[in-house]
Image (cartoon, rainbow, N blue to C red):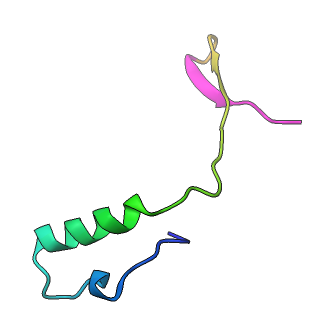
Amino acid sequence: MNGITRAPWGESFKFDRFDVRYLKAKDSAGKFAIVQFGICLFRYDHHRHSFTGVPLE
């Protein structure tokens, strides 16, 4: 999770309650900026009754 910033109070500790861990992760994820994404194309093969990946050229 490259790029997530944390305040010193945002560190997760072993003894944190689950709701506290959730709130810390939620706060951190809200500040996260997406820097990269991927797209994968598929095509349905009627003979095999399945999907196959489409190579990009």
Image coordinates for residue 7, horizontal then vertical, percent? 36, 82
Left or right: where does residue 11 sit relative to residue 37?
left
Q: Which residue sits at x=56%, y=22%?
A: 50
Say which residue appears at 19% left-offset and 88% top-offset.
Answer: 14
Q: Residue at x 50, y 69 (%)?
A: 1
Residue 29 pos. (x, y %): 39, 62
Classify residue 41 by image quadrant. top right
Residue at the right extreme of this rendering: 57
Q: Which residues are magenta?
A: 49-57
Is residue 43 shown left or right of residue 50?
right
In terms of depth relative to the viewer, which is nearer, 20 or 38? 20
Q: Which residue is depicted at the point 26% across and 72% down?
A: 24
- Please name whichever residue, 10 or 19, is drawn nearer the observer in this view of the structure: 10
- Magenta stretch: residue 25 in it? no
User: Horizontally, is 19 left or right of 6 in the view?
Assistant: left
Q: Quadrant of residue 49?
A: top right
Residue 34 placement: quadrant? bottom right
**In this picture, is 38 found above or below 9?**
above
Quarter of the image where the C terminus is located: top right
- Count every numbered label the image shows and give the total: 0
